[in-house]
Image (cartoon, grey):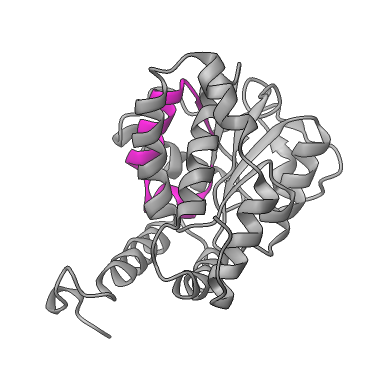
């Protein structure tokens, strides 16, 4: 096992090793399930392919995502175990900047994980966390997994849902409910990225802090200015150019 303390902070591997450390800590505490570790490993491979940096196309998607969250009437940020382990403070900050609710939503759901995630978010400044200890969840049509169970005051009523590290089935189901969906996904070919309204092809540990910063800047803009940013964004163009980065091809400007 590599001792991350022996690796300089500017070393290319330092960041990925630090992320792994956060996830293994999350796994040991019960926040993260073993399947979440597998999912991260898959994403890490794509991060290598995009150069382990946020592309200009991802920055455009982040700008559009911030605009959509700020324009939303009832935005909700969906949090799973990996998200809670990797960037809980940034999620809370994003919720504050965009006036979004935070809801726990889990594929592998149990009460212990719900409360652990809630506790983690509250330690990082959250006041209210939805989707925890709910006696009467409502159900997203078309889904059979535990992700179909949503808080009646949260995702069920939301007009915009931010679903970082998402599975494609729920993304499509939310779209079918006429909701706008923002996602962070390192794989531009995933069902999640392909089906979402706005797909940020990037690592969540880079993109969520950038979302916080961008939202803080854009909240000073008028609704018309935000709408213009949103209307000028093309998600297919964003995904196509993200794929070109992975393939080492020249991107359109």
Q: Does the magenta stretch include residue 94?
A: yes
Name the foreground residue: 26 vs 61. Answer: 61
Question: Which residue is located at x 73 percent, y 58 percent?
Answer: 191
Q: In this view, does 25 lie above or below 235?
A: below
Task: Examine the rendered structure and indicate whether residue 118 appears above or below residue 52.
Answer: above
Q: Residue 94, how many percent across, how many down?
A: 41, 32
Nearest the viewer among 15 and 54 is: 54
Magenta region, mostly helix, strand or loop? helix
Q: Which residue is drawn at 33% across and 61% down?
A: 22
Q: Residue at x 69, y 65 (%)?
A: 189
Residue 241 lies in quadrant = bottom right
Give the x, y percent position of residue 31: 44, 53
Q: Can residue 167 be seen in this view?
A: no
Q: Nearer the viewer, residue 221 or 185?
A: 221
Residue 172: tell me if it is visible.
Answer: yes
**Magenta-colored span:** 79-103
Residue 171: x %, y % from top left: 72, 46
Between 171 and 222, the one lying in front of the other is 222
Left/right placement of residue 94 relative to residue 186 reads left
Q: Farthest residue in the bottom direction? A: 1
Tell me the quadrant of the picture where the C terminus can be found: bottom right
Estimate the x, y position of residue 121 in percent, counting from the top left.
38, 37
Q: Is residue 123 one of those drawn in magenta?
A: no
């Amino acid at each position: 096992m590599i001792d991350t303390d022996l690796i300089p902070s500017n070393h290319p591997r330092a960041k990925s090793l630090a992320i792994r450390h956060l996830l293994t800590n999350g796994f040991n505490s019960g926040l993260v399930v073993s399947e979440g570790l597998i999912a991260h490993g898959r994403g890490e491979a794509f991060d290598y392919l995009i150069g382990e940096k946020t592309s200009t196309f991802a920055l455009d998607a982040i700008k559009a995502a911030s605009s959509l969250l700020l324009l939303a009437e009832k935005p909700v940020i969906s949090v799973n175990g990996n998200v809670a382990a990797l960037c809980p403070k940034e999620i809370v900050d994003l919720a504050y900047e965009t006036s979004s609710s935070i809801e726990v939503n889990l594929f592998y759901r149990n009460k212990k994980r719900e409360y652990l995630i809630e506790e983690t978010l509250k330690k990082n400044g959250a006041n209210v966390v939805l989707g925890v200890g709910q006696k009467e969840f409502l159900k997203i049509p078309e889904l059979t997994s535990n992700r179909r169970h949503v808080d009646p005051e949260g995702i069920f009523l939301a007009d915009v849902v931010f679903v970082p590290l998402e599975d494609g089935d729920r993304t499509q189901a939310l779209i079918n409910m006429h909701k706008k969906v923002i996602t962070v996904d390192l794989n531009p070919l995933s069902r999640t990225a392909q089906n979402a309204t706005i797909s940020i092809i990037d690592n969540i540990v880079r993109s969520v802090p950038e979302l916080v910063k961008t939202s803080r800047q854009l909240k000073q803009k008028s609704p018309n200015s935000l709408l213009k940013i949103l209307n000028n964004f093309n998600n297919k163009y964003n995904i196509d150019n993200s794929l070109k980065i992975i393939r080492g091809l020249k991107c359109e400007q």
